[in-house]
Image (cartoon, rainbow, N blue to C red):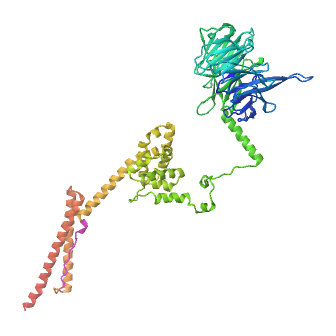
């Protein structure tokens, strides 16, 4: 199996029991595909050898006396500096570094011929042959002018297929170009070789920016030959693997860029270049999330060579640091097989949590629980103790900035200072500072403040305004004013959020507004009644109804009167006055019943009549008093 440029990985030749991969940091990881466990992890000396750019598995047998041969698995890696190193799983380190003439640049591909020799191609357009037993390079030749990207060893033909933009086949003994295949428009990205039982070799290739797999038949002659068959894909392929049986049945699998696996079923004896072959079945791996179903990317695939499990395909999915392996039997009756699996990130997070808990329990190490309110952020620079003691606390600085440093002559805060204060208040969640800034009534100042407010502070500001809307009337007015300007200024920010998230964020504001609208009709009715009562009270006070005098009494102390007689006359006059008042009240009552005018006017007429009767009674009393005082005088004069 050969892999693309982005993938430096491969399955072991013993049925894919082991899997090796190298990440972007140059760390080599070896996984056990049976148990889904990480067997080894190795970080090479990058300064000495450089990052690994290609790898292949090597099986080396060692004969022991009176015992059967032992097969050791090694990993040969091509590096960025053009050298070849061999990693030993038994030692867990680099066992050998092959000497001799190396590449003048990075190695792009490496392959093993199962006979003790390695073949590498590099950016210098050379093929170098390495001998593992001698631990050095033994031969080389040029394959330019195009830069080679991948190579594959052809077992039956003892040839080497080199892929660049064209596919070239070289005889490894004579180092001569045997065949040339043309058909790709870009550089070959992945390559795989097939050795049939009848001695025929086939090569499968796929190129960059192409969604096809070309099937080439190697027969040792010809140039610019076309492909024997073309396989279609839905996306670019980064990994190819194949398997051929003795009866000519061929299985091909490709791992595409979108993480799907396409499986093709062919017959070597009936290949046709006229028809394009579509995948027999496609495998798609998705996560078993409760809310959404997300795809999980497959990294590589390999056909199981075990006779008892020959119908299965082995694949791995996840990331290079967190992989899961599975042997799966495809359902060829359906075009798409959706495989529901747990996300490897979640599985590794659970395992890591359990390991951390066990490690903490074993070492009795606990992380301190620190409150966010009591955290002190210290600088990494060295500061003298004297300077630390005299330093003004940050809270005092903010308070001084809030009160003194940002005011104009009229007592208003500067717009830029308001923006800074609002940002500090939202960051520190200081309620006093937030209310001080949001108490601004000037619409122009609010507009300028929100224009300068960064977008990440829009969501915390909406939460604070929702809290203010649930408070007193003055806070509600300020919050509505700020919310109106905020919605008109940052409309695009609010609309860019998810509908459910926006509805949840503005639910408090909408709930308060709806509650107040429900109470609007009752409030208007109460307001109308109160205004009517106030207007009636104001009209009554303007008419001066309480300033009229019901009784006027003139007491003249200069006139001599006889006390007993005056008292008697006064009683008689008061009785007459009461009779007159009674008659006047009855008359006024009859007039009130008959008249359709308002009640206030009837009371005014009755009061006027009562005052007139009182004046008339007073005049009659004065006249009777004068007549009584004259009669004695006449009687005294007559004798």
| 490 is higher (above) or lower (below) than 146 | below
Question: Which residues are the magenta region?
Answer: 545-557
In front of the other: 469 or 54: 54
Q: Which residue lies furthest to the right in this view?
A: 66
Q: In this view, does 370 lie above or below 328?
A: below
From the viewer's perspective, tell me whether residue 529 is left or right of residue 284. Answer: left
Residue at position x 24%, y 69% from top? Answer: 547
- The quadrant of the image that shows the C terminus is bottom left
Residue 583 percent across, percent down from the top left: 19, 67
The answer to whether residue 584 is above or below residue 292 is below
Q: How many marks?
A: 0
Q: Is residue 365 visible?
A: yes
Magenta span: predominant SS is: loop
Of residues 441 and 100, the one nearer the viewer is 100
User: Per the image, is 552 magenta?
Assistant: yes
Q: Which of 609 and 320 is in front in this view?
A: 320
Residue at horizontal 50%, vertical 43%? 505
Where is residue 373 drawn, in percent x and y?
59, 54
Could you tell me which quadrant the N terminus lies in?
top right
């Amino acid at each position: 199996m050969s892999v693309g440029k982005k993938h430096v990985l491969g399955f072991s030749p013993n049925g894919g029991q082991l899997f090796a991969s190298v990440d972007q940091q140059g760390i080599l990881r070896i996984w056990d595909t049976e148990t889904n466990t990480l067997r080894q992890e190795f970080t090479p000396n990058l300064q000495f050898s450089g990052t690994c750019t290609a790898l292949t598995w090597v099986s080396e047998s060692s004969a022991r006396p009176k015992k059967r041969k032992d097969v050791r698995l090694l990993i040969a890696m091509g590096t960025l500096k053009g050298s070849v190193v061999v990693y030993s799983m038994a030692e867990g380190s680099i066992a050998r570094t092959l000497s001799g003439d190396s590449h003048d640049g990075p190695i792009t591909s490496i392959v093993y011929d199962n006979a003790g020799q390695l073949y590498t191609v590099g950016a210098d357009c050379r093929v170098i042959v390495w001998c593992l037993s001698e631990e050095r390079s033994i031969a080389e030749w040029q394959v330019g002018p195009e830069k080679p990207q991948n190579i594959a060893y052809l077992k039956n033909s003892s040839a080497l297929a080199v892929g660049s933009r064209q596919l070239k086949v070289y005889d490894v003994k004579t180092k001569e170009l045997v065949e040339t295949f043309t058909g790709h428009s870009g550089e070959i990205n992945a390559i795989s070789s097939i050795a049939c039982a009848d001695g025929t070799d086939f090569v499968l290739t796929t190129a960059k920016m192409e969604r096809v797999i070309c099937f080439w038949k190697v027969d040792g002659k010809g140039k610019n030959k076309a492909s024997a068959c073309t396989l279609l894909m839905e996306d670019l392929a980064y990994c190819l693997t194949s398997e051929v049986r003795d009866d000519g049945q061929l299985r091909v699998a490709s791992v595409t860029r979108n993480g799907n696996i396409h499986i093709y079923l062919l017959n070597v004896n009936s290949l046709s270049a006229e028809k394009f072959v579509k995948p027999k079945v496609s495998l798609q791996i998705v996560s078993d999330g409760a809310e959404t179903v997300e795809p999980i990317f497959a990294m590589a695939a390999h056909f199981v060579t075990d006779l008892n499990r020959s119908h299965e395909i082995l694949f791995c999915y996840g990331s290079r640091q967190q992989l899961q392996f599975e042997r799966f039997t495809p359902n060829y009756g359906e075009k798409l097989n959706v495989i529901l699996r747990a996300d490897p990130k979640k599985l590794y997070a659970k395992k890591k949590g359990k390991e951390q808990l066990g490690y903490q329990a074993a070492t009795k190490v606990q992380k301190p629980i620190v409150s966010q309110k009591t955290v002190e952020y210290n600088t990494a620079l060295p500061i003298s103790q004297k300077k630390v003691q005299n330093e003004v606390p940050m809270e005092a600085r903010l308070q001084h900035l809030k009160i003194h440093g940002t005011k104009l002559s009229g007592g208003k805060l500067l717009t830029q200072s308001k923006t800074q204060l609002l940002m500090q208040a939202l960051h520190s969640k200081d309620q006093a500072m937030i209310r001080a800034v949001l108490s601004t009534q000037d619409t122009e100042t609010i507009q300028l403040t929100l224009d300068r407010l960064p977008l990440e502070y829009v969501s915390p500001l909406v939460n604070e305004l929702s809290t203010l809307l649930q408070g007193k009337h003055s806070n509600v007015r300020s919050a509505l004013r700020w919310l109106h300007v905020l919605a008109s200024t940052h409309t695009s920010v609010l609309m860019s959020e998810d509908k459910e998230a926006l509805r949840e964020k503005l639910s408090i504001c909408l709930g308060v507004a709806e509650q107040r609208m429900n109470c609007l009709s009752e409030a208007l009715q109460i307001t109308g009644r109160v205004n009517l009562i106030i207007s009636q009270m104001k009209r009554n006070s303007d008419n001066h109804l309480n300033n009229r005098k019901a009784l006027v009494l003139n007491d003249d102390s200069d006139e001599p009167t006889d006390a007993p007689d005056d008292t008697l006359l006064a009683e008689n006059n008061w009785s007459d006055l009461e009779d007159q008042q009674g008659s006047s009240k009855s008359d006024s009552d009859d007039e009130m019943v008959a008249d359709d005018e308002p009640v206030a006017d009837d009371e005014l007429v009755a009061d006027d009549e009562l005052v007139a009767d009182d004046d008339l009674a007073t005049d009659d009393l004065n006249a009777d008093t004068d007549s009584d005082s004259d009669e004695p005088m006449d009687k005294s004069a007559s004798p």
